[in-house]
Amino acid sequence: MRHKPDILALNDRIIRCRRCPRLREHCERVSAEKTARYRDLAYWGKPVANLLPPGPGKAEGPGLLIVGLAPGAHGANRTGRMFTGDRSGDFLYLAMHQAGLCNQPTSTDRDDGLTLIDTAITSACHCAPPGNRPTACELDRCSGFLDQTFDALANLKVVLSLGRIAHRSVLGLYRKRGHVQRLNQCPFAHGAVFRFDAAPALLCSYHPSQQNTFTGRLTPAMLLDVLSKARELIAHRRGCDGV
């Protein structure tokens, strides 16, 4: 049986991590230089920890884990909270609120009163990368945090990967644990669902980046549909498990 790590201690280790010099230099430089619209605000500038619902130590734990790519340079890297303070977060939290997965439709800063409902949020890379593109080595160094997050949230029923890179990171973990044999066994496609006997179901969505939302590749209705599907899967899995 795998050891269940303490999720708050894990978050502390994430925040203190300095394994990737390129990423740390980039985050610190962005935090010092800022951008004009946020020039009077202090930036977080450190790795961004997992975002958890209230009472993360409770036995039942969240049923859904959302996995994104990485903090935005002027979003989570500024605010210190996943998907907070940029348009990707605006798009995601509005849909989550409509799906009953958080208490409010906006997320502007760490003290805005946002509360997740039966959901935790993490990312494949916990530092903002230049050009939103972490290298394969950087993703590999961060993969241990995803591994430990899975162990800490032991009652997950569904994992939602936002975008191909997050999907591949989750599949890498599933392959390591013997749930899949090959990464191409579960090809990424928006709305695709993959079910496993001994692992949370895996659900895919396009990432709510401006590139996708401004072009209409991902619409509010499409994201809401995926989140609603996640809730249905959680309810079904809990019914089957008797939980």
Image (tube, helix red, strand yellow):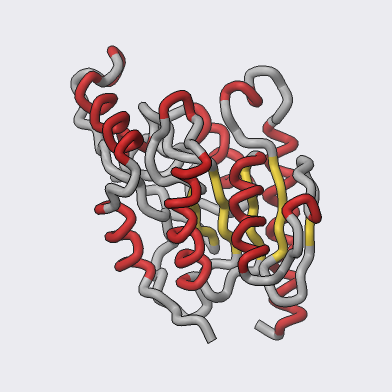
Q: Is residue 53 above or below residue 3?
A: above
Q: Position of residue 231 (x, y in %)?
A: 69, 59
In the image, what residue occupies the spot 19% across and 21% down?
40
Q: Quadrant of the C terminus?
A: bottom right
In the image, what residue occupies the spot 41% across and 38% down?
84
Left or right of 138 in this view: 21: left
Q: 10 or 114: nearer the eye?
A: 10
- Indicate the quadrant where residue 36 lies: top left
Q: Position of residue 154 (x, y in %)?
A: 53, 75
Q: 96 or 122: nearer the eye?
A: 122
Q: Quadrant of the N terminus?
A: bottom right
Q: Position of residue 236 (x, y in %)?
A: 76, 71
Q: Is residue 32 above or below residue 165?
A: above
Left or right of 194 in this view: 33: left
- Indicate the quadrant where residue 34 lies: top left
In the image, what residue occupies the spot 69% across and 18% down?
215
In the image, what residue occupies the spot 56% across and 46% down?
97
